[in-house]
Image (tube, rainbow, N blue to C red):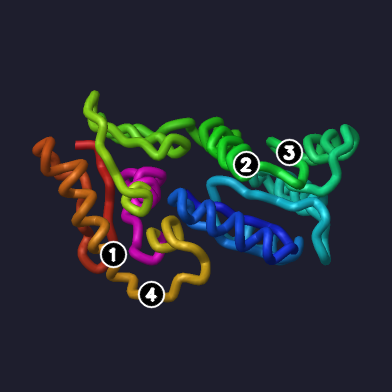
Amino acid sequence: MRVLLVEDEQRLADLVKGGLTGEGFAVDVAYDGRDGLWMATENDYDVIVLDVMLPRMNGYAVCAKLREAGNWTPIMMLTAKDGVYDEAEALDTGADDYLAKPFSYVVLLARLRALVRRGGRERPVSITVGDLVIDPAGLRCRRGETEVSLTPKEFAVLHGLARRAGEVVSKSDLLAAAWDFSYDGDANIIEVYISALRRKIDLPFGRTTLVTVRGAGYRLEAE
């Protein structure tokens, strides 16, 4: 799953990014409101963590502009303020949840998972492709009634395919779904994860639902 973290305190941003990355999230970071708004507009995220007190454009304005543009990605607002009026303003501008600093990382993680589980207004809680079920919040996958164990990166690649089931998804799109904005490694790493996914979601079940489209990318289809 892909997260946008908009936070101007670099030390806090590094700590949160490190923790979320360890949990299997791909995390992009913006250090001011305008950059955060641009990144949220140009990329597809599962959840946005948005500080209120930001340079160039505050979090309330960023949230309001995203909602005005029809972007319903779940938003968790972070702020040093803890008054009820600040919380009300955050929710009134379109945020889905609110967490005051200082906060517990465990609580942040739990709330982010809850937001992903609920999804945006136009996103399903889970994705079903034939008898393959992907649960983004729980990082869980099953084929029929059989649980399939995936690594966080395997899950992220599968999630990128499942969200566009039936369509051809390019390597670059899968990299964007599973790695952060700064990744500049070899795009062929995707082939490694596609092979691993086939061994887990297709071969044991006698399926061929993960298809290579030569020269274009990959397609996940219901058999």
Q: Is residue 220 left or right of residue 5?
A: left
Callout 2 amino acid = Leu
Q: Is residue 25 visible?
A: yes
Q: Residues within 10 Å of mark 3 (few under 14, many from 20)?
A: many
Q: Which residue is mark 2?
A: 108
Disc with the residue nearer the chain's start (1 vs 4): 4
Which numbered disc covers residue 98? Answer: 3
Q: Secondary structure at mark 3?
A: strand
Under mark 3, the amino acid is: Tyr
Q: Nearer the viewer, mark 2 or mark 3?
A: 2
Q: Quarter of the image for the C terminus: give it.
A: top left
According to the picture, the residue beneath numbered tag 1 turns out to be 216
Give me the residue at 64% from left, 46% from top: 71
Pick whichever, 24 or 36, lies toward us: 24
The label nearer to you, 1 versus 4, is: 4
Mark 1 or 3 closer to N-term?
A: 3
Query: Residue 197 location in percent, x, y?
Result: 23, 49
Q: Earlier in the sequence, mark 2 or mark 3?
A: 3
In the image, 83 versus 121, the foreground residue is 83
Mark 2 Cα shell of 10 Å, populated few (<14), some (14-19), many (≥20): some
Separation (CA) of disc 1 from disc 3: 41 Å
Tag nearer the camera, 1 or 3 = 3
Question: Quick one: label 3 or label 4, which is nearer the N terminus?
Answer: 3
Q: Which residues are magenta?
A: 156-173
Q: What residue did someone put label 4 on?
A: 185
* Residue 100 placement, left or right of 155: right
Which of 44/14 is in front?
Answer: 14
Q: Are marks 2 and 3 in contact (CB under 8 Å)?
A: no
Q: Are marks 1 and 2 in contact (CB under 8 Å)?
A: no
Mark 1: which amino acid? Ala
Is there a contact, CB below 8 Å, between mark 2 and mark 4? no
